[in-house]
Image (cartoon, rainbow, N blue to C red):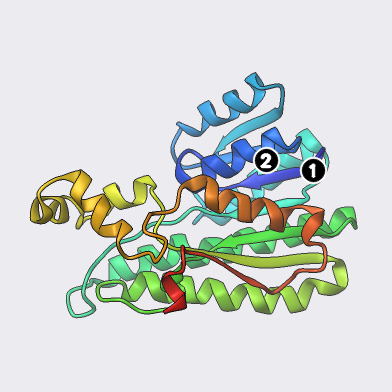
Amino acid sequence: MKDKVALVTGAASGIGRATALMFGREGARVVVTDISPAGEQVAQDIRAAGGLSFFAVHDVTDEVTWQKVMARTLDVYGRLDVLVNNAGIAISRSVAEMSMAEWREQMAVNLDAVFLGTKYAVRTMRLGKRGGSIINVASVSGLVGSPGTAAYSASKGGVRMLSKAVAMECAPDSIRVNAVFPGGVRTPIWQNADWWDGFVQQVGSEDEAWKKLEGASPLGRMGEPEDIAEAILYLASDASRYVTGAELVVDGGYTAR
């Protein structure tokens, strides 16, 4: 990753934060973006460790903001080598109770934003004629269904097929496109879910809630953000130069049943 220019969305916390920090340690120049200003601290941490990084407040659902972020990346670093489309949200609701606004919000963040990021990354990478790597963070919910996740699963399934189609389209440009499918990972997306407080109350404590989630994995634990970041690092690096259109499932064996 040395001297590669990498942009990571949703990088203020969780998988995005772990990925940005790992890229920085590996010598990449990292563009940290998030809708939360907390992303500035991640960029500062990279710089404090001797790396190069800047932060941009970024609403991934807004096309104009994508244009501005890409333009700033070119102004500061001169090119783009890696994009990690990581930003995402989850709203748990039965299909009968879900509002159209809730459906559209998840599609906007989880799928439309991946399209926008991919669109502008491909344009930017083609300018440099150096190829590149796009990694889209999907979810095992895009591979298997579960109650209450209709919109989330549909959005992540869309990421799966978008990644494959663009991989075929961009192979002649040496732009690789792959998707990572995390299982249960200990990130703030769980505590931010609208059902979390009720779940904690039902099982008795937050510790018990985590234990219940850990029990879903054959390995008997939840993933950590760094587990997913390692997979993303592989797909971003030249070690995966012959890999495109792939699905890298990192779920502790959850989908092996």
Tag 1 residue: 4
Mark 1 element type: loop
Element on which disc 2 rests: helix
Query: Residue 27, position in %: x, y?
Result: 76, 35
Name the kind of residue labelled 2 in the image: Phe
Please tell me the numbered disc located at residue 129. none
- Residue 98 in percent (x, y) is at 22, 72
Label 2 CA crowd tier, 10 Å (few <14, some 14–19, many 20+)? many
Q: Is residue 22 left or right of residue 101?
A: right
Instruction: Out of 210 and 5, give the one closest to the viewer.
Output: 210
Residue at the image position 58 percent from the left and 25 percent from the top? 45
Question: What residue do we see at 45% from left, 40% from top?
Answer: 13
Three-letter residue code for mark 1: Lys
Number of numbered tags placed on the structure image: 2
**Sequence-first disc among 2 and 1:** 1
Q: Where's the C terminus, which quadrant?
A: bottom left
Q: Residue furthest front?
A: 219
For the question of whether residue 117 can be seen, the reply is yes
- When the figure is inspected, residue 37 is found, relative to residue 247, above or below; the finding is above
- The image position of residue 177, as x and y in percent, is 70, 67
Residue 58 visible in the picture:
no
- Residue drawn at the location 46% of the way across and 77% of the way down: 256
From the image, tell me which residue sits under label 2. 23
Between 32 and 191, the one lying in front of the other is 191
Foreground: 48 or 83? 48
Query: Relative to the observer, which residue lies in front, 36 or 240?
Result: 240
Q: Residues within 10 Å of mark 1 (few under 14, many from 20)?
A: many
Q: Residue at point 12% right, 54% down?
A: 203
